[in-house]
Image: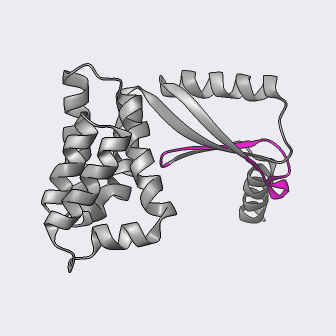
Amino acid sequence: MSTRASAARYARALLDVVIAEKIDPQQVERQLEAIANLLTEHPELKKVLTNPAVPVSGKRGVMQELVGRLAPVTPVAKLLMLLADRDRLVLVPDLLSVYRERLMDHLQIVRADVTTATPLPADRLAQLEQRLAEVTGRKVTMTTKVDPAIIGGVVAQIGSTVYDGSVATQLETMRQRLLRQS
């Protein structure tokens, strides 16, 4: 089983516990993020915690110390100790990623990647966000980027669905029609 698939099982279980115990799921996300960031910022620590040659008891001791400082008695602490006991701390980055995806789904939030030819003013971005929320039936969080190659209009990607209202695409469609007619 891949690390992503294993992380998905743990993330699903963690979110289920968090919801059942009425714990703030976003706080849990922040706790997971703190541990993942710690491993990213300290490569030596990550090497120790993910190295199969290091005994599980040593990994458990290090993780117990870290968890004691960040989140002593929470579902995150329990999960991290379980991962240490099973020598699966390598899953932490994927666990955070999958937990975030599941949390967004639980909160009925979707991400939209929006591309425009020029930067949009805040009021236009708010209108676009509102319109995408109406189309998806969910709350939308947007990330924006500027790409002058689209000439004008907007390209929005939500998951695998792309809404392409760019001038460049419209011009290409017109060109293809004209070529077919000739």
Which image quarter is the C terminus in?
bottom right
Image quadrant in which you'd find residue 15: top left
Q: Is residue 80 left or right of residue 144?
A: left
In the rendered image, the residue lying farthest to the bottom is: 53
Q: Is residue 122 left or right of residue 156?
A: right
User: Where's residue 126, x and y in %?
Assistant: 72, 24
Q: Is residue 149 magenta?
A: yes
Viewer-side residue, 33 vs 173: 33
Q: Is residue 32 magenta?
A: no
Q: Is residue 161 left or right of residue 70?
A: right
Q: What's drawn in magenta, residue-wise? A: 145-160
Image quadrant in which you'd find residue 106: top left
Viewer-side residue, 59 vs 89: 59
User: Where's residue 148, x and y in %?
Assistant: 85, 55
Q: Is residue 38 above or below residue 55?
A: above
Q: Is residue 12 visible?
A: no
Who's the residue at 72% across and 22% down the image? 127
Who's the residue at 35% across and 34% down the image? 28
Looking at the picture, the colour scheme in use is: one colour
Q: Is residue 32 visible?
A: yes
Who's the residue at 38% across and 41% down the image? 70
Viewer-side residue, 13 vs 60: 60
Which image quarter is the N terminus in?
bottom left
